[in-house]
Amino acid sequence: MKPRTGVSACLAGQPVRPDGKDKHIHWLTQVLAREVTLIEVCPEMEMGLGVPRERIDFAAVHGNRRLVGLSSGRDLTDIANAANGRLLAQSATDLDGHIFKKNSASCGIVKGGMFARAFMARYPDLPAIEEDELKNESARANFLSRVRNCFAKRIG
Ligand code: SF4
């Protein structure tokens, strides 16, 4: 039995980007996956947006920060909230961390992506990291150590 971390599905090689491509980081699936079971999650696919799809981002609508389609202007905030709720309900309490795609209005931590924010609000004690930080050896070691600690606590 290994620790389990969520990972933005495009980073694990799934062709779920808006343009139908991936952002595969081979280190994740070929090295990290030896030690950690990766649970692939794409919030925008869970929203039912499909591939290919229009790009989405945040915009101010009547003074509120909303998630909208960049070409259609469609307000997707409520759909995202519902999808994120489903994903978090599925993950229940069997995750030990999460690796997020940076610069995404769904997955980015720094950008305040909706799924990343919902995940961190629901699981404030679980380690969460953007893929870029994993290039830094000490940040990677720290993340893995925290994942292992969470796993040890979870399985008792
Ligand atoms: S929503 Fe997240 S997992 Fe899906 S393509 Fe965008 S960054 Fe990748």
Image: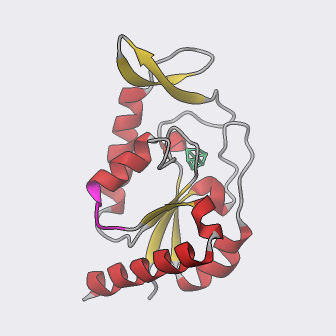
Q: Which residue does the image show at 36% across and 10% down from the upper left?
A: 62
Judge whether 85 appears above or below 134 on screen: above
Residue 101 is a magenta residue: no
Q: Position of residue 103 (x, y in %)?
A: 58, 43
Q: Where residue 21 appears, x then y in whole percent?
A: 75, 46
Question: In terms of secondary structure, what is the magenta stretch mainly?
Answer: loop
Quadrant where the C terminus sits is bottom left
- In the rendered structure, the answer to whether residue 72 lies left or right of residue 66 reads right
Where 105 sits versus 120, above or below?
above
Residue visible at 70% across and 64% down in the picture: 25
Above or below — where is 76 with respect to 105? above
Where on the picture, by quarter, is residue 145?
Answer: bottom left
Q: Where is residue 64? Give x, y as percent.
A: 35, 19
Which residue corresponds to the image point at 73% horizontal and 37% vertical from the top-left?
A: 19
- In the image, the segment drawn in magenta is 122-126
Quadrant into which the N terminus falls: bottom left
**Compared with residue 23, is residue 48 higher up or lower down, i.e. above or below?**
above
